Amino acid sequence: MKHLHLSRCARLLAAVLMAFLPSAMPCAENVREQMDFGVKAAKRGLWREALFRWEKALKLDPQNARLMNNLAVAYENSGQFEKADALYRQALRLDPGSRDIKQNYDLFSSYYKQILARRSGRQEPPSASTQPKKEDAPEPAPPPHDDAPPPR
């Protein structure tokens, strides 16, 4: 009788664990799905959709430096430079060895400094390699490759 009771408890415990395990798995899948969907949207030039998907994924995985980088590129492309700057910095703090994040931030940073200088009224002569093409909007970054950070 005692063996039957333990067996019943084990089955009940297994059923409870199985009920919670699937909810944990889709979370990781959902981050990946949102990230991939954002990449596909960015490749099509749908930056608002990419931004939405990457924000959603970042809520599920708030320490993901790659997501922060992708989201920063989307913010940059939508003219939300302060948010882009903050996310690039945060991504670099989380993954200081990432060459892609550093390269994206360096390019963004030189452009952002020019915008801030222009807005404050002191015109700094931009170098030929960093001169913006439009008034206050950055040149759209190339869309990201699969799950890799968007290249510049």
Image (spheres, helix red, strand yellow):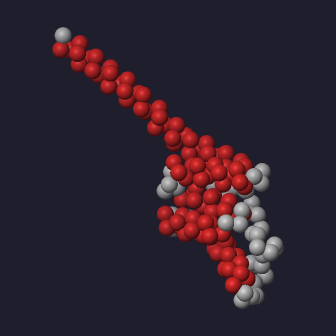
Judge left or right: residue 8 versus residue 54.
Answer: left
Residue at point 63%, 58% (across, down): 70
Q: How many marks?
A: 0
In the image, 83 versus 145, the foreground residue is 83
Residue 23 location, x and y as percent? 47, 34
Residue 39 seen: no
Residue 61 location, x and y as percent? 51, 51
Residue 82 location, x and y as percent? 62, 70
Residue 118 location, x and y as percent? 73, 83
In the depicted structure, whether residue 123 falls above or below residue 111: below
In the image, 75 versus 43, the foreground residue is 75
Residue 96 seen: yes
Residue at point 64%, 75% (across, down): 109
Residue at point 71%, 78% (across, down): 115
The image quarter in which residue 31 lies: top right
Judge left or right: residue 132 versus residue 20.
Answer: right
Residue placed furthest toward the top: 1
The image quarter in which residue 131 lies: bottom right
In the image, 150 versus 80, the foreground residue is 80
In the depicted structure, whether residue 150 falls above or below residue 124: above
In the image, 13 versus 123, the foreground residue is 123
